[in-house]
Protein backbone atom coordinates (compact mmCIF):
# COMPACT_ATOMS: atom_id res chain seq x y z
CA UNK A 1 0.00 0.00 0.00
CA UNK A 2 1.02 3.65 -0.34
CA UNK A 3 2.24 4.00 3.19
CA UNK A 4 6.00 3.69 3.69
CA UNK A 5 8.09 6.60 2.53
CA UNK A 6 11.34 5.52 0.83
CA UNK A 7 14.53 6.86 2.40
CA UNK A 8 16.71 8.67 -0.11
CA UNK A 9 19.07 6.32 -1.95
CA UNK A 10 17.70 3.20 -0.29
CA UNK A 11 16.45 1.63 -3.56
CA UNK A 12 17.69 1.78 -7.12
CA UNK A 13 14.29 0.99 -8.68
CA UNK A 14 13.11 3.80 -10.95
CA UNK A 15 10.10 5.53 -9.41
CA UNK A 16 6.72 5.10 -11.07
CA UNK A 17 4.20 7.87 -11.37
CA UNK A 18 0.63 7.23 -10.25
CA UNK A 19 -0.57 6.37 -13.76
CA UNK A 20 2.23 3.85 -14.30
CA UNK A 21 1.61 2.30 -10.88
CA UNK A 22 -2.08 1.87 -11.66
CA UNK A 23 -1.18 0.27 -15.03
CA UNK A 24 1.25 -2.08 -13.24
CA UNK A 25 -1.49 -3.23 -10.89
CA UNK A 26 -3.90 -3.77 -13.80
CA UNK A 27 -1.21 -5.78 -15.64
CA UNK A 28 -0.68 -8.00 -12.60
CA UNK A 29 -4.43 -8.55 -12.18
CA UNK A 30 -4.73 -9.58 -15.84
CA UNK A 31 -1.71 -11.88 -15.52
CA UNK A 32 -3.22 -13.61 -12.48
CA UNK A 33 -6.53 -14.12 -14.30
CA UNK A 34 -4.64 -15.67 -17.22
CA UNK A 35 -2.52 -17.77 -14.86
CA UNK A 36 -5.58 -19.66 -13.70
CA UNK A 37 -5.51 -21.53 -17.04
CA UNK A 38 -1.76 -21.27 -17.72
CA UNK A 39 0.08 -21.43 -14.37
CA UNK A 40 3.55 -21.50 -15.97
CA UNK A 41 3.10 -17.95 -17.24
CA UNK A 42 3.08 -16.71 -13.64
CA UNK A 43 6.81 -17.43 -13.23
CA UNK A 44 7.69 -14.88 -15.91
CA UNK A 45 5.47 -12.32 -14.20
CA UNK A 46 7.23 -12.97 -10.89
CA UNK A 47 10.68 -12.66 -12.45
CA UNK A 48 9.74 -9.30 -14.00
CA UNK A 49 8.89 -7.75 -10.65
CA UNK A 50 11.45 -5.91 -8.52
CA UNK A 51 11.44 -6.56 -4.75
CA UNK A 52 9.96 -3.10 -4.16
CA UNK A 53 7.85 -0.77 -6.28
CA UNK A 54 8.62 2.90 -5.75
CA UNK A 55 5.79 5.32 -6.48
CA UNK A 56 6.10 9.11 -6.69
CA UNK A 57 2.94 11.07 -5.89
CA UNK A 58 2.44 14.67 -4.83
CA UNK A 59 6.18 15.33 -4.29
CA UNK A 60 6.47 12.22 -2.13
CA UNK A 61 7.91 8.77 -2.76
CA UNK A 62 6.38 5.61 -1.35
CA UNK A 63 7.80 2.10 -1.20
CA UNK A 64 5.47 -0.83 -1.80
CA UNK A 65 7.18 -4.18 -1.01
CA UNK A 66 6.17 -6.87 -3.53
CA UNK A 67 8.60 -9.62 -2.57
CA UNK A 68 5.64 -11.50 -1.09
CA UNK A 69 3.86 -11.23 -4.44
CA UNK A 70 6.82 -12.70 -6.31
CA UNK A 71 6.99 -15.65 -3.90
CA UNK A 72 3.27 -16.38 -4.29
CA UNK A 73 3.40 -16.17 -8.07
CA UNK A 74 6.35 -18.58 -8.22
CA UNK A 75 4.55 -21.10 -6.02
CA UNK A 76 1.38 -20.80 -8.06
CA UNK A 77 3.35 -21.35 -11.28
CA UNK A 78 4.19 -24.86 -10.05
CA UNK A 79 0.66 -25.78 -8.97
CA UNK A 80 -2.12 -23.25 -9.37
CA UNK A 81 -4.78 -22.93 -6.69
CA UNK A 82 -7.83 -21.04 -7.90
CA UNK A 83 -8.81 -19.90 -4.41
CA UNK A 84 -5.32 -18.61 -3.71
CA UNK A 85 -5.23 -16.79 -7.07
CA UNK A 86 -8.64 -15.24 -6.34
CA UNK A 87 -7.39 -14.02 -2.96
CA UNK A 88 -4.27 -12.62 -4.63
CA UNK A 89 -6.39 -10.81 -7.20
CA UNK A 90 -8.56 -9.32 -4.43
CA UNK A 91 -5.47 -8.07 -2.62
CA UNK A 92 -4.19 -6.32 -5.75
CA UNK A 93 -7.58 -4.74 -6.34
CA UNK A 94 -7.41 -3.43 -2.78
CA UNK A 95 -4.06 -1.79 -3.62
CA UNK A 96 -5.76 -0.13 -6.58
CA UNK A 97 -8.63 1.04 -4.35
CA UNK A 98 -6.10 2.51 -1.89
CA UNK A 99 -4.52 4.41 -4.77
CA UNK A 100 -7.90 5.78 -5.88
CA UNK A 101 -8.63 6.89 -2.32
CA UNK A 102 -5.24 8.57 -2.11
CA UNK A 103 -5.96 10.57 -5.26
CA UNK A 104 -9.51 11.51 -4.29
CA UNK A 105 -9.91 15.18 -3.40
CA UNK A 106 -10.51 15.91 0.29
CA UNK A 107 -14.13 16.13 1.33
CA UNK A 108 -15.57 19.58 1.76
CA UNK A 109 -15.60 20.31 5.48
CA UNK A 110 -17.21 23.76 5.49
CA UNK A 111 -20.83 22.48 5.18
CA UNK A 112 -20.17 19.93 7.92
CA UNK A 113 -18.72 22.61 10.17
CA UNK A 114 -21.74 24.85 9.59
CA UNK A 115 -24.07 21.98 10.42
CA UNK A 116 -22.13 21.23 13.62
CA UNK A 117 -22.26 24.87 14.69
CA UNK A 118 -26.04 24.90 14.13
CA UNK A 119 -26.43 21.80 16.32
CA UNK A 120 -24.31 23.25 19.13
CA UNK A 121 -26.34 26.46 19.02
CA UNK A 122 -29.48 24.60 20.15
CA UNK A 123 -30.81 25.32 23.68
CA UNK A 124 -29.97 21.86 25.01
CA UNK A 125 -26.26 22.61 24.49
CA UNK A 126 -26.35 26.05 26.11
CA UNK A 127 -24.79 24.77 29.35
CA UNK A 128 -21.97 22.92 27.64
CA UNK A 129 -18.66 24.65 28.34
CA UNK A 130 -15.00 23.97 28.73
CA UNK A 131 -13.19 23.78 32.06
CA UNK A 132 -13.66 26.95 34.14
CA UNK A 133 -11.52 28.60 36.77
CA UNK A 134 -12.74 26.23 39.48
CA UNK A 135 -11.81 23.19 37.35
CA UNK A 136 -8.34 24.64 36.78
CA UNK A 137 -8.00 25.36 40.52
CA UNK A 138 -9.01 21.80 41.40
CA UNK A 139 -6.54 20.42 38.88
CA UNK A 140 -3.74 22.52 40.38
CA UNK A 141 -4.61 21.35 43.89
CA UNK A 142 -4.48 17.73 42.75
CA UNK A 143 -1.16 18.33 41.04
CA UNK A 144 0.17 19.97 44.22
CA UNK A 145 -0.91 17.00 46.35
CA UNK A 146 0.60 14.56 43.88
CA UNK A 147 3.87 16.49 43.94
CA UNK A 148 3.81 16.52 47.73
CA UNK A 149 3.36 12.76 47.86
CA UNK A 150 6.14 12.27 45.36
CA UNK A 151 8.39 14.40 47.54
CA UNK A 152 7.58 12.34 50.61
CA UNK A 153 7.74 8.82 49.18
CA UNK A 154 9.38 9.29 45.84
CA UNK A 155 7.77 8.63 42.47
CA UNK A 156 9.20 5.11 42.36
CA UNK A 157 7.10 4.20 45.41
CA UNK A 158 3.74 4.92 43.77
CA UNK A 159 3.41 1.59 41.89
CA UNK A 160 4.13 -0.34 45.08
CA UNK A 161 1.71 1.78 47.14
CA UNK A 162 -1.00 1.44 44.50
CA UNK A 163 -0.53 -2.33 44.35
CA UNK A 164 -0.66 -2.57 48.13
CA UNK A 165 -3.93 -0.62 48.26
CA UNK A 166 -5.49 -2.70 45.48
CA UNK A 167 -4.50 -6.03 47.01
CA UNK A 168 -5.65 -4.88 50.45
CA UNK A 169 -9.10 -4.06 49.05
CA UNK A 170 -9.19 -7.40 47.22
CA UNK A 171 -8.23 -9.21 50.41
CA UNK A 172 -10.95 -7.45 52.39
CA UNK A 173 -13.54 -8.32 49.73
CA UNK A 174 -12.47 -11.99 49.80
CA UNK A 175 -12.54 -12.03 53.61
CA UNK A 176 -16.03 -10.53 53.79
CA UNK A 177 -17.29 -13.01 51.19
CA UNK A 178 -15.70 -15.94 53.03
CA UNK A 179 -17.26 -14.89 56.35
CA UNK A 180 -20.67 -14.55 54.72
CA UNK A 181 -20.40 -18.00 53.10
CA UNK A 182 -19.20 -19.56 56.36
CA UNK A 183 -22.07 -18.10 58.32
CA UNK A 184 -24.59 -19.15 55.68
CA UNK A 185 -23.28 -22.73 55.61
CA UNK A 186 -23.11 -22.93 59.39
CA UNK A 187 -26.62 -21.60 59.73
CA UNK A 188 -27.89 -24.15 57.23
CA UNK A 189 -26.01 -27.03 58.86
CA UNK A 190 -27.44 -26.20 62.28
CA UNK A 191 -30.97 -25.99 61.02
CA UNK A 192 -31.29 -22.21 61.34
CA UNK A 193 -33.42 -21.90 58.22
CA UNK A 194 -36.99 -20.64 58.11
CA UNK A 195 -40.04 -22.67 57.24
CA UNK A 196 -40.57 -23.28 53.51
CA UNK A 197 -43.61 -21.03 53.11
CA UNK A 198 -44.34 -17.42 53.92
CA UNK A 199 -47.50 -18.42 55.83
CA UNK A 200 -47.63 -20.42 59.10
CA UNK A 201 -46.95 -24.10 58.61
CA UNK A 202 -50.31 -25.02 60.13
CA UNK A 203 -52.08 -23.10 57.35
CA UNK A 204 -51.76 -26.41 55.50
CA UNK A 205 -53.23 -29.34 57.47
CA UNK A 206 -50.69 -31.86 58.66
CA UNK A 207 -52.53 -34.58 56.75
CA UNK A 208 -51.81 -32.76 53.47
CA UNK A 209 -48.13 -32.48 54.38
CA UNK A 210 -48.08 -36.21 55.11
CA UNK A 211 -49.92 -37.07 51.89
CA UNK A 212 -47.36 -35.06 49.91
CA UNK A 213 -44.56 -36.80 51.79
CA UNK A 214 -45.93 -40.24 50.89
CA UNK A 215 -46.31 -39.17 47.25
CA UNK A 216 -42.68 -38.04 47.16
CA UNK A 217 -41.60 -41.33 48.72
CA UNK A 218 -43.57 -43.27 46.10
CA UNK A 219 -41.64 -41.36 43.44
CA UNK A 220 -38.30 -42.16 45.10
CA UNK A 221 -37.71 -38.52 46.14
CA UNK A 222 -36.50 -39.39 49.62
CA UNK A 223 -35.05 -35.97 50.51
CA UNK A 224 -38.35 -34.28 49.69
CA UNK A 225 -40.29 -37.01 51.46
CA UNK A 226 -38.34 -36.48 54.71
CA UNK A 227 -38.71 -32.70 54.45
CA UNK A 228 -42.48 -32.91 53.96
CA UNK A 229 -42.80 -35.43 56.79
CA UNK A 230 -41.00 -33.04 59.14
CA UNK A 231 -43.34 -30.14 58.29
CA UNK A 232 -46.27 -32.48 58.76
CA UNK A 233 -45.17 -32.96 62.37
CA UNK A 234 -44.67 -29.22 62.88
CA UNK A 235 -48.13 -28.54 61.43
CA UNK A 236 -49.68 -31.15 63.75
CA UNK A 237 -48.08 -29.64 66.87
CA UNK A 238 -48.93 -26.10 65.82
CA UNK A 239 -52.55 -26.96 65.05
CA UNK A 240 -52.75 -28.49 68.56
CA UNK A 241 -51.71 -25.10 70.00
CA UNK A 242 -48.45 -26.45 71.40
CA UNK A 243 -47.04 -23.06 70.33
CA UNK A 244 -48.32 -19.99 68.55
CA UNK A 245 -47.70 -19.85 64.79
CA UNK A 246 -44.63 -17.93 63.64
CA UNK A 247 -43.61 -18.20 60.01
CA UNK A 248 -40.02 -17.02 60.71
CA UNK A 249 -39.28 -19.75 63.26
CA UNK A 250 -36.50 -22.25 62.48
CA UNK A 251 -36.45 -26.02 63.17
CA UNK A 252 -34.12 -25.58 66.15
CA UNK A 253 -36.36 -22.87 67.54
CA UNK A 254 -39.37 -25.21 67.28
CA UNK A 255 -37.48 -27.80 69.28
CA UNK A 256 -36.38 -25.26 71.91
CA UNK A 257 -40.03 -24.29 72.49
CA UNK A 258 -40.68 -27.73 74.03
CA UNK A 259 -39.56 -28.17 77.63
CA UNK A 260 -37.47 -31.20 78.50
CA UNK A 261 -40.43 -32.78 80.27
CA UNK A 262 -42.69 -32.46 77.20
CA UNK A 263 -44.09 -35.75 75.92
CA UNK A 264 -43.46 -34.53 72.36
CA UNK A 265 -39.80 -33.57 72.76
CA UNK A 266 -38.13 -37.01 72.21
CA UNK A 267 -40.06 -37.68 69.00
CA UNK A 268 -39.59 -34.13 67.67
CA UNK A 269 -35.86 -34.22 68.52
CA UNK A 270 -35.46 -37.45 66.55
CA UNK A 271 -37.52 -36.11 63.62
CA UNK A 272 -35.58 -32.85 63.62
CA UNK A 273 -32.26 -34.69 63.55
CA UNK A 274 -33.39 -36.85 60.63
CA UNK A 275 -34.56 -33.74 58.81
CA UNK A 276 -31.29 -31.84 59.44
CA UNK A 277 -29.04 -34.70 58.32
CA UNK A 278 -31.09 -35.33 55.20
CA UNK A 279 -32.00 -31.83 54.09
CA UNK A 280 -29.22 -29.57 55.38
CA UNK A 281 -26.25 -31.95 55.62
CA UNK A 282 -27.29 -33.64 52.34
CA UNK A 283 -26.65 -37.11 53.70
CA UNK A 284 -27.93 -39.98 51.53
CA UNK A 285 -31.51 -40.95 52.27
CA UNK A 286 -33.62 -43.92 51.31
CA UNK A 287 -36.76 -45.76 52.26
CA UNK A 288 -35.46 -46.55 55.74
CA UNK A 289 -34.75 -42.86 56.39
CA UNK A 290 -38.30 -41.97 55.46
CA UNK A 291 -39.65 -44.86 57.55
CA UNK A 292 -37.83 -43.46 60.63
CA UNK A 293 -39.40 -40.06 60.00
CA UNK A 294 -42.86 -41.65 59.77
CA UNK A 295 -42.25 -43.57 63.00
CA UNK A 296 -41.35 -40.29 64.74
CA UNK A 297 -44.58 -38.77 63.40
CA UNK A 298 -46.57 -41.62 64.84
CA UNK A 299 -44.84 -41.16 68.22
CA UNK A 300 -45.89 -37.52 68.10
CA UNK A 301 -49.48 -38.67 67.57
CA UNK A 302 -49.80 -38.07 63.81
CA UNK A 303 -52.01 -40.99 62.88
CA UNK A 304 -54.48 -40.42 60.04
CA UNK A 305 -57.98 -41.53 61.00
Image (spheres, rainbow, N blue to C red):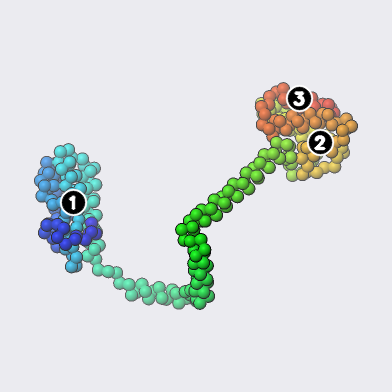
Residue wearing tag 3: 292
Q: Is residue 213 left or right of residue 92?
A: right
Q: Are marks 2 and 1 in contact (CB under 8 Å)?
A: no
Give the total of numbered labels: 3
Q: Which of marks 2 and 3 precedes in the sequence?
A: 2
Q: Is residue 111 left or right of residue 268?
A: left
In the depicted view, which residue is nearer to us: 281 or 230? 281
Residue wearing tag 2: 255
In the depicted view, which residue is nearer to us: 34 or 295? 295
Where in the figure is residue 215, as x and y percent of width and height? Answer: 71, 29
**What residue lies at 23% left-to-right and 43% top-to-bottom?**
84
Element type where label 3 sits in the image: helix
Element type where label 2 sits in the image: helix
Q: Which of marks 1 and 2 precedes in the sequence?
A: 1
Q: Is residue 158 left or right of residue 83?
A: right
Give the CA separation, mark 1 to mark 3: 86 Å
User: Can you see residue 43?
Assistant: yes
**What residue lies at 69% left-to-right and 39% top-to-bottom?**
186
* Label annotation for residue 66: 1
Q: Is residue 132 left or right of residue 251?
A: left
Where in the figure is residue 182, as x and y percent of width and height? Answer: 66, 41
Give the CA separation, mark 3 to mark 2: 18 Å
Give the CA separation, mark 2 to mark 1: 87 Å
**What residue lies at 71% left-to-right and 40% top-to-bottom?**
187
Q: Which of marks 3 and 1 precedes in the sequence?
A: 1
Note whether 289 is above or below 49 in the view shown: above
| Quadrant into which the C terminus falls | top right
Image-quadrant location for residue 2: bottom left
Of labels 1 and 3, the one closer to you: 1
Note whether 253 is above or below 22 in the view shown: above
Amino acid sequence: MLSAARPAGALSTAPLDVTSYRAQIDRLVAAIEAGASDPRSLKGVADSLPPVLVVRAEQQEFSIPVEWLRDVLRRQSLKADRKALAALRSRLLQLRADLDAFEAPPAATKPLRQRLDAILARPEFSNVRGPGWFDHLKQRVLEFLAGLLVGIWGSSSFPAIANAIVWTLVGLAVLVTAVWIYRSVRRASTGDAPAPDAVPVSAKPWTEWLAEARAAAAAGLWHDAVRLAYWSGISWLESGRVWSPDRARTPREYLRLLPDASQYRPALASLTRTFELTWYASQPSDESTFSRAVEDLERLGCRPS
